[in-house]
Amino acid sequence: MKVIYLHQYFNIPKKTGGVRSYDIAKHLINKGHTVEMVTTNTSLSNSSGWETSTEDGINVHWFHLFYSNKLNYYKRLLAFFSFAYHAAKKGSKLQGDVVFATSTPLTIAIPALYISWKKSIPMVFEVRDLWPDVPIAIGVVKNPIVKYLAKLLESYSYKKSKAVIALSDGMKVGIIKAGCEENKIVVVPNFSDRELFNSKNTGKEFRAGRKWLKDFPLLIYAGTFGIINGVDYLVDVAEQLLLLKSDIRILLIGEGKEYNNVILYAQKKNVLNRNLFIESAISRSELPQLLAAADLASNIVINVPEVWNNSANKFFDALASGTPVLINGGGWQADLIDKENAGITTHGLTLNQAALKINEFLNDKERLSLSSKKAQIIADKYFNKDDLTKKIEQVLFQSIN
């Protein structure tokens, strides 16, 4: 099987960000299939146009197109449509039995639809976030014409897809509401890579390199500093923990549009470098050390129901490493954590109540140990990487038969 794989922001393990597409492509390669990955090189560079490299057997076609979460709305839209145009031209020249497109952004469907039509091959569409529902819900997309066109593209993409992959049951519900036939949809959540995190990392080296950390309990956030993440929530929690005279330390690691704003907010709340610390993003290969040092990992989002259906990598990485998880929103992840006792949830609590709950949890060694074991059990039971990549392979294979 020859797969033309479209992912605008494809990552390899030595870079920052999620590697779901890399894991899927690597599985396909290992099973004897061919993968042509069409993506972007988003770094600032004097280079232009396309370049090709081979990454662990994956043929990767990189289009030089600068992108950053710090760009304004219109410049980001321009980047989306620019890639859609160039990816359509590139993809239509590649050999393939199926075109596999993964969002976000939703505009990735444009080249997928074109390639599918031009080459008369089936299209499989993977939905990582419910676009345009999420940007509409948080007020990023306000123009009624843009809303209409985005909804039209969404529903048309589902209609023309042979199969649609959703990353959560909540996303599946949203996709059905957009007019997709239920029998087309397959739910395949993100993966917990137990092999990556099942190492002998103790976190001692990570802690030793930070004099402020010592042996204090550590709560971390590792991910994007974006509007929907609402990382300032942890700044407010840090303020409450200081009032409680708690010895908990909070570490925020990542990058994004709100990074500098979070630093300024932490300074304003007088918690920066007292009990809350902020560092720039690290590569995926560095994550095992970070999570080994952490006592509690977090998946923080704003209080908007549309974003609760997300399937953030940080959640699955924490489970794989056996790190209990803090969830501050509602939705399926919060339900799972509560049901399986693999961490704590704070949705609906005041900041003071949340801080009290976090402080109590992180100072209960027996509960921490139990939650750690539960996290690993969940990772193996529901989010096994080998099982889920095999499921996606089957979806792609069935689409061409």
Image (cartoon, rainbow, N blue to C red):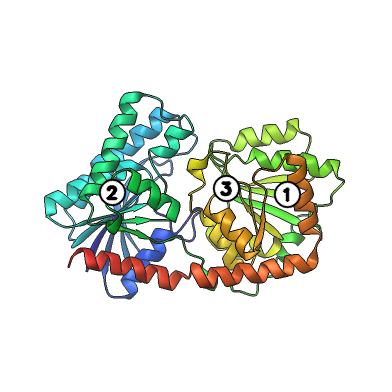
Q: Position of residue 116 (x, y in %)?
A: 17, 52
Residue 304 image offset from top left, x and y in percent: 53, 38
What residue is shown at x 44% (from left), y 39% (from top)? Answer: 134
- Whether residue 139 is situated above or below residue 168 in the rendered picture: above
Real-space Cα distance between discs 3 and 2? 25 Å
User: Which residue type carries mark 1?
Assistant: Ile
Q: Is residue 112 above or below residue 288?
A: above
Label 2 sits on residue = 180
Badge 3 or badge 2: first in the primary sequence: 2
Pointer 2 local density, CA inside 10 Å: few below 14, some 14–19, many at least 20: many
Q: CA distance from mark 1 to mark 2?
A: 42 Å
Q: Which residue is mark 3?
A: 330
Distance, label 1 to label 3, CA atoms, is 22 Å
Residue 241, horizontal then vertical, whole percent: 80, 45
**Would you say residue 168 is visible in this rendering?**
no
Secondary structure beneath dot 1 equals strand
Mark 1 and mark 3 lie on one chain; the one further toward the N terminus is 1
Q: Quadrant of the N terminus?
A: bottom left
| Residue type highlighted by circle 3 | Gly
Q: Is residue 380 left or right of residue 294?
A: left
Disc 1 target residue: 250
Q: Name the kind of residue labelled 2 in the image.
A: Cys
